[in-house]
Amino acid sequence: MSKFIATAAIRGARKLVAQAEEMLEKAIAEKGKDLAFEFPDTAFYLPMVYAMTAFPVKTLGDMRVALGYAKELLHDEPEEHIWKPYLGEALDSGMATLFAEEVILALRYVYGLEPCKDPETGYVYNGFISDTIQRNLGIQLVDGTMPGFAAIIGAAPTDDIAVNIVRELQEKNILTFLSGQSNGDSVTKQLLRKGVELGWDSRIVPLGPDTEHTLYALDWAIRASLIFGGKKPADFKGHLKYQKDRVFAFAIVLGPLDDIKWTTGAGAINMGFPAIGDTDVPVIHPTGVCTYEEVDKELDHTKIVQKAIEMRGLKITVEKPPIPVSYGPAFEGERIRKEDTFIEFGGQRTPAFEWVRMREMEEIEDNKIVVVGDKWQERYEKGGQLPLGILIEVAGRKMQKDFESVIERKIHSNINEAQGVWHMGQRDINWIRISNNAKKEGFTLEHLGLLNATMTHHRFRSIVDKVQVTLFIDEQDVKKHLEEARAAYKERDQRLGSLTDEAVDTFYSCLLCQSFAPSHVCVITPERLGLCGAYNWLDGKAAFEIDPTGGNQPIPKGECLDSKYGRYTGADEYLKKATGGAVETLNLYTIMENPMTSCGCFECIIAIIPEANGVMIVHRGHTGMTPIGMKFSTLAGTVGGGAQTPGFMGVGVNFIASKKFLFGDGGIKRIVWMPKSLKERIAEDFKKRAEEAGVPDLLDKIADETICEDSEKLLEHLTNVGHPALSMDPIL
Ligand code: SF4
Ligand code: ZN
């Protein structure tokens, strides 16, 4: 880092701390030092201050303490000729800057100024990133579908360059945050002018118009080590190391730099995130004594993304089918409105289905795409609605009938990841739209087959040797094959129903989250899916066939030591090894003793309510209070990080209706409270389960937030309805 940068970073930090102080004193004068503050939906106060110092800022008065920490880190502006020690001083200043920016943004929330709104376009920026969003994204961080994060600060020289940079990041599946401006313009505005879809679904998230808003991205990053990494507040070295080793972020600074950009950049560099600029950044001091590898420049905008990725040491391989539109998860969330639809299939408008069927090797021809239907090219026309049967036939030496459903479930992503093509539902309730734009780019029905063939090969390489795709578009053909498909779905469901923990001799582990939560292992059994909800036993089995050294390993069950609590010798042995001794033993079917660990991406949290002699379940996305006096976000903060926490456990939604759900503790009859939307989501399966358990009206007896949000009213309700938990053995 050259002297110029260090000086600018130190000067910028001094400015920001002074500005934060002035704003804070004004706010305290107007609103009082006891005014409570929290960012929306987080359990971590001012996350950067909290992670680094463990000080929980809860009021305006507390912000004075936070700024005190910032001031301790400030240095005097250096004199012209001595510059070598400034590296450390600039980094200190960078951290002071992050604290000051956090206070400034918090105060802007106090005054209702965040999230910012663009006065010209009315566009509302994202603002602070909630814990919920962080957890929602957890699984994509670990399974490689989101390999890294970019923060773009400033504005590109032209709108087209802005679009090209962002498209390149999207195609590489990188999540991009936008902030700041240069010369009165910004990448956000440039993309808006070009009609680019912004938001979480498209992985382009505008945080705010100023450089200070970049802090929201860093606040998001720092919570990864708190939530997933189990790093303790104040362990600043641990946090910074975690960020450097596991959070693959970098910054691209477009346009000239000012003091605030330099000092924010120094804060990011502190966290191990390099920055690359498109101007003549003075990256190396003329004497060559002090260089700083975390700052670099690339004047060619077609190379800047690649260079940033290399600087951060990211390896990205992207599989793109040979189709004429962009492709990747960033396009998965895009909607296609009716007016933009060129043609559609299914969706209760026409008969449709999608079906993966296992074949013998000699029965099919690899990569053959057939469209069956009279004059099908002519019927692919604007405003059309066609029947559509998608039959994907696969063969392979390691293929098993059980994998049909695993491969079939990926059709949704296969199709949705094409820009301008949209897919919903599955099996015989699917619905597909192709947009006018995609058609204009040359997307045809054959491409719909082709992308499924390519992606099936790619995702299931080594279990699939051959893929043949047939598209039927004549009604009588679709109906005929629909009958066969339905028979196959039914057979599959029966097979799944018969898959119990007792019926198999192997469970599967999932180690994917270890990249974020090093001591966490999900033990996945036929009757218990992974806590993120994304991996069931068949997925684990298929994944092991695809990559025998990958994140899903077989766990020989061994001997069953306790069938009520679900303790198996094989699982214990495996866990001891896989967690480096952190977990000695596991009971699969209880929350009370040696329960499964939790990483951070659980769909739901179960927590015991001793006075109700039962448990409550709250899902991610429910932002209200729960009867144990904690919101999801607070509760989640206490169970993550790969620890066993008796009385608390993260689980997947579909586990709730499993026969093994808290089997050792008395099963579903223990559930006394769940949010209404969760009840609705699981109603169908849960009612079946409740009938089997001899309590057919259980779901109605379970309280929700419309009945109570505290434990006193909860008890009253349970007594009134005669909830079975009250008469069960004591849970404690
Ligand atoms: Fe993480 Fe468990 Fe999901 Fe695997 S199954 S991705 S370990 S939460
Ligand atoms: Zn996880």
Image: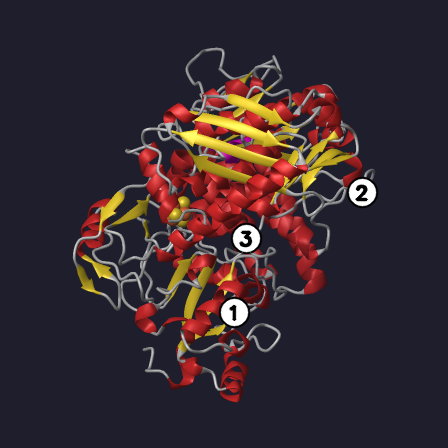
User: Mark 1–mark 3 contact, CB under 8 Å?
Assistant: no
Q: Position of residue 472 (x, y in %)?
A: 61, 32
| Circle 3 crowding by C-alpha within 10 Å: few under 14, some 14–19, many from 20 | some
Residue located beneath label 2 in the image: 122
| Closer to the eye: label 3 or 2 | 3
Q: Quadrant of residue 315?
A: top left
Checking the image for residue 674, the label placed there is: 1
Decide if ligand 2 comes within 8 Å of the CB at mark 2.
no
Residue type of the residue flagged with mark 1: Met
Residue located beneath label 3 in the image: 132
Residue type of the residue flagged with mark 2: Gly
Q: Residues in magenta?
A: 262-269
The answer to whether residue 360 shows anywhere in this view is yes
Q: CA distance from mark 1 to mark 3?
A: 18 Å
| Closer to the eye: label 1 or 3 | 1
Name the residue at 43% across, 22% down.
Answer: 84
Name the residue at 72% across, 62% down.
Answer: 30
The residue most toward the right is: 120
Name the image quarter holding the C terminus. Answer: bottom left
Label 1: state its secondary structure.
Answer: loop
Q: Is residue 534 magenta?
A: no
Please, is residue 238 above or below residue 151 in the view? below
The residue most toward the bottom is: 720
Please, is residue 362 above or below residue 266 in the view? above
Q: Main SS type for the magenta part?
A: helix
